[in-house]
Amino acid sequence: MDRKSLVDKVFSLVSEEEALSFLKEYAYKDDALAKALYDRFLLEDSEAELRHEVRSIFAHAGNPYSRWGTSLDWDEIRNELSRMISKAEYFIQEGKYRCAACIASEIILAVGEYHSEDEVYHYEEWDWEDFCTTEACDLIASLVSKGLLESSFVNELYEDVARASAFESYRHYALCYPKLADLYFLLKSYSLDAEDFLQEMDKKIGSLGKEERRREEFLILKINYLRSRGREDDAEKVICDNFDLPKISTLKIDELVLEGKTIEALGALDKAISLSRDDYHKEKCRRKKFELYREMGDKDGQIRQLTDLLRSSSYDMYQDYLSLKSLAGVGTREIVSEIVRDLLSGKACFYQKETARICYEEGLLPELETCLVSWSGIDKPFETANAYIGALPPDARVRVLNILSDRIREDSVPVKSSHYPYIRQKIELLMDSCDQGKEMMTSLVMELKTNYSNRPAFMRELSKLGV
């Protein structure tokens, strides 16, 4: 049997997964095969070949169930386009900017064409899917703003985006909105001289008003553009003037950390925390400060940051508490006691379950009692009470149970049969929490049966409690 027949025989009798796995393992050991794979698939292709590779995704994505849906398999298309975006990002790392831009541009064109022809916008399952066009727009915008593409090629990209904008899915069904419109503006304005371009950017940024995310994106494009023209001082001024915006401050902080300027980075993080209106961004900044202090070996700095995180009621309170405990040791109780009192006094919102767990582990029983009767809409007070009420003295348990019983009474007033299972579950949790819970909930069930005997659905739920 000749070599070709032998290879054909093997591939006809094994699955693609088996063949790929073997090829991968063999390439790890064989330099010639590894180089052949690289040369075939990652060595710089012509722009036409890259565009053809994107188009071939759609040519081979027929949907066998097209009778009941789209003619193309858009799940497969999405996965394959994601692979092409990864390939474009690889080309950027290798300095092959035109190759990356060609892939992104063809994704925008091809998705617009086939998405419109297949009328994907009529299918609700794809309402929030952009099929990698957003990533493609971001990739091109970044390359253009950094001055990594020659002007003549930018004009070609502008023509591609202009053609794509005419497709039905982009034009009337908001696919990739507003990214495509923003990219169109950027490419159209790029042919202007530097000052006119910056004026157009400023007008665009000013027109966005409260659209913070888009403002951030355009400001980053402006910063990149200024730096690509050697105007570092102007770029720094843009950063300074907009430091309250999360993406702008993060850009500067990451640069300082990358340059090894830890003290300056800590100062920038403090500035971001003081200026930002975004609580999530503030927490990210505090965690970044903690990481920097840890890298510096500054124990006191780490304790301060963990204290700030707990005081601001971070989303990961309990893990922060454990980290604090490992650093502060016997001093943890005093620190935590003060923080918990501030949280419970209403100086900050807090997560009830995590706060209760910390109070329980530190033996802060008066604070634990207050915590169990304080909750917000996102908390699950009955589950929390079930877990921790047993740690309280008997008189405190009764006080907590009285307040939670009143909540159950309030929930029972509306005639909504869909709520009855949840009321039963709340009673079950309190019945299982402690001896006083069983006694008081038994009495409450009898009361509810007497008051609402005319509600058969409610009676059926309550009868499941065995009272």
Image (spheres, rainbow, N blue to C red):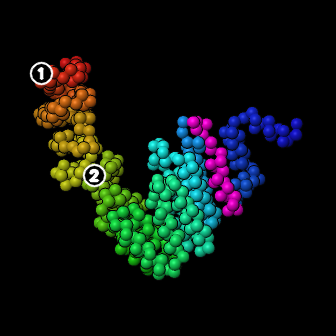
Q: Main secondary structure of the magenta part?
A: helix
How much space separates mark 2 and mark 1, taking CA atoms? 43 Å
Query: Of callouts 2 and 1, which one flags the residue occurring earlier in the amino acid sequence?
Result: 2
In the rendered view, tell whether residue 313 sits above or below residue 62: below
* Circle 1 residues within 10 Å: few <14, some 14–19, many ≥20: few
Residue under label 2, please give it: 313
Q: Measuring from the top left, give residue 254's x and y in whole percent.
A: 44, 65
Q: Secondary structure at mark 2?
A: loop
Q: Measuring from the top left, give residue 435's x and y in whole percent.
A: 18, 26
Residue under label 1, please give it: 450
Q: Secondary structure at mark 1?
A: helix
Quarter of the image with the C terminus is top left
In the rendered view, tell whether residue 380 sits above or below residue 448: below
Camera-nearest residue between 411 and 164:
164
- Read off the magenta span: 46-67
- Relative to residue 450, is residue 322 drawn left or right? right
* Circle 2 residues within 10 Å: few <14, some 14–19, many ≥20: many
In the rendered view, tell whether residue 75 sits above or below residue 145: above
- Front label number (2 vs 1): 1
Asked where in the image residue 459 lies, by quadrant, the reply is top left
Camera-nearest residue between 132 and 292:
132
Q: Residue at 35% x, 74% y: name it.
A: 241
- Residue 152: tell me if it is visible: yes
Q: Residue at 57% x, 49% y: name it.
A: 117
Q: Residue at 46% x, 53% y: name it.
A: 173
Quarter of the image with the N terminus is top right
- Relative to residue 439, is residue 144 drawn left or right? right
Q: Is residue 56 magenta?
A: yes
Q: Is residue 66 magenta?
A: yes
Residue type (three-letter) at the residue carrying disc 1: Thr
Q: Measuring from the top left, give residue 202's x and y in whole percent.
A: 41, 74
Residue type (three-letter) at the residue carrying disc 2: Ser
